[in-house]
Amino acid sequence: MLPRPFRVVATRRETHDTMTLELESLDGEGLSFAPGQFTMLQAFGVGEVPISISGDPAGPGRLVHTIRDVGGVTRALCRAREGDVLGVRGPYGRGWGVSDGAGGDVLVIAGGIGLAPLRAAVLEVAASRDRFGRVHVLHGARTEADVLFGDELVGWAAGSDIEVAIIVDRAATSWTGRVGLVTELLGGASFDAERTLALVCGPEVMMRFVAAGLVARGVPPDRVRLSLERNMRCGVGLCGHCQLREYLLCVDGPVLSLDAVRQQLGVREL
Amino acid sequence: MRSLQDLLAEHPFFAGLDESTVSMLVGCSVNVHYRAGEYLFHEGEPADRLFVVRRGRVALDVHAPGQPEMVVDTVDEGGVVGWSWLVPPYRWFFDARAVQEVSAVAVDATCLRAKCDEDPALGYALMQRVAGVMYHRLQSARVRLLDLYGAGRAG
Amino acid sequence: MTTAEPADVEPAVTLDLDGLQELVDLLAGQGYTVLGPTVRQGAVVPGRVVSLDDLPRGWGDTQEPGSYRLRRRDDEALFGYAADAISWKSVLFPSRELVWAGTRTPDGGFSIHSEEGSGGLGDPPYAVLGIRACDLHAVAIHDRVLRERAHPDVHYEARRKDAFLVTVSCSDPSGTCFCVSMGTGPRADAGYDLALTELLGDQHTFLARAGTERGAELLAQLGPRPAEVGEVRAADEVVERSTQRMGRTMDTTDIRTLLYDNAEHPRWDDVASRCLSCGNCTMVCPTCFCTSTEDHTSLSGEGTEHWRIWDSCFTSDFSYLHGGSVRSSTRSRYRQWMTHKLASWIDQFGTSGCVGCGRCLTWCPVGIDITEEVAAIRADPQPPPGPGEGG
């Protein structure tokens, strides 16, 4: 349970408030993970927060985190420079279970920073593309400046036989893409609903509406997976903070299927 | 070159209308084309047409002094643009601009309103479709109003 | 579990006061930090025990929702109170625990080492003389929550693992007790090294039974005489009387479904209008385990300490998430605590989280009674209409 020291070997600014950090462990052991898992990332002397792993599961030697600056600790993490050492505990949590989508179609629906944990899932799919049917990545962002991994999205569409659609809440007139809500992208995606695995991550309100749209299209609720988020202090099921009724999101989640959490998501302030 | 009858009949907005109803609408319609960057209409102008988008993308823009012009909605093929012809004072609320080359069928509003007055059944059928599209547009707008991806919010 | 003796128990023996003191001395001699109930600042709280005089001789307690008073008994009972004001959670799972300390290294990194904390009452191994059945169950619950996990709490493990537990049956339950409803008392049936029942007959004696091998060994060293039939019966009567004198009851039938289905019950608004969200209940509850972490950095920035501290789901930022708290209303926080304690706990850990000790009633400044809240919902359930469609 002690943090392992990892050195920052590369940083990349993704948007005005989001940074990607690439880390390598000082002990050379790397970190194997399943897409959808997270680590407790420690800014020495500042604090520790849960951050989804956004890197390639096939490359455990380099730990990649995409972090949005939303508070004291994430701000310190976003300001990390090459050579800085951070503490890492993990990986923790239940991941997307991408291989459950083999033999069918896969929908990856990401709102905002939600694309970060889903990037790892897309990379896993792309690595064995022929195991899956049609693969869609639907990404909603606030504005065109907030679209995450834009170049990579283009690359997936061009080189990995993945259909990518992007929509933003509003845009400058230089934007030639779609404007609207991410749920509107479902209409243009063709997939065999009954044999589809849908992976959804974003603000909880967005996930509720996307889930409703998916169910309306005929995707079985136990094939809709959401990555839920609550306050986390320990990441290992001991501190009690991340409870969503009976679920400890750090242990039972963060990925849970819609049928398991439908009732809970419908209760205000649960 | 397809007939207006065919173009309208196969458009999702008119799905379910019978042949004679569609041909009534044909009487109010004309094919239109816009190059990328051209405006279909501007805020404040008389709202006189319903645009049935067959190909391309239309952006609804709002301009304000001192701020960059913003796109608040886009409509792609299969969608319809323009509702202000339905509600007095029949003036366009936003600018509508072709993002790419746009092919559409423009249905004249005066003609359309007259036909609806004559034939309430047609009027009802059209209003059902209008209400359906507005329902989804309103939901979309309301949820975006929450600014879920905004600073200080999850996501 | 409560009154009937299990069939396969160790034979009972009898200790007198000298024997009990000898027990304390033996434990101290074996290197245990011997702790027991003591009277301090008008309450019975855990403290160091060297002699029997350190115990609350002749003291009882009067507890009601929102009220705790010590009272002088008319006998010399050493364990004549109901439940200690502070539970043994504070010893095995202290409110502040240093988890690790680290220093920056010249190459820009940092080195971390785990710390062995020391408690305010002394270092482990602990011998606890006088833990009640309800609190023994709470320890068992904490064992499940903090030890039997994929990532156990190593600090709890360190304090708990060699703890020698001597339980004393409850002879004088209070107005807030409901261990019988929760199946946790007034006499313990497992989880102890030694079990005592205090007998205040012609002589002041203790019926004693071993619950473990090391308990039996220690008992053998005291050379006690076998208990007479009458003494065993007297002990049973003490327990039976306690069973009949519970201050409260709670019907736990299908309580998980009851609370899950009534998440929008108007009773939550009712209790929220009284609840101060002060968190006392979580502090005194022997099973509450929520914690948070604090990083304390030296002024130079070269050293950092990472502490684990008690936290309470009643604090406004317990559920903080990017710009706001998920549970911003008192209503939602009270519902969270009670539903977790009585319902979700069952899904998470296989038992109820409540042991019926009554402390949350006693120490609530406005006297909220969890048994009453459950009864109110049970009397008038209001599940939501139709199947839940939250998605």
Image (tube, coloured by chain):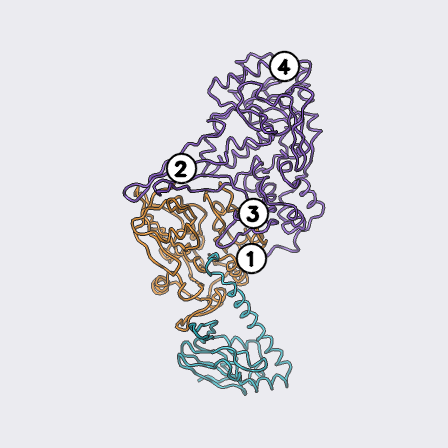
Residue at (48% x, 36% y) in the render:
C96
Badge 4 is on which residue?
C227
- Residue placed most toward the observer, A89 or C100: C100
- Mark 2 falls on what kind of element? strand
| Chain A shade in the render | orange
Q: Type of residue at label 4?
A: Ala
Badge 3 is on which residue?
A245
**CB within 8 Å, label 3 to label 1:** no
Q: CA distance from mark 2 to mark 3?
A: 30 Å
Q: Which chain is cyan?
A: B
Q: Nearer the viewer, mark 1 or mark 4?
A: 4
Q: Which chain is purple?
A: C
Badge 1 is on which residue?
C391
Q: Type of residue at label 2?
A: Trp
Q: Chain of mark 4?
A: C
Q: Type of residue at label 1?
A: Gly
Q: Chain of mark 1?
A: C
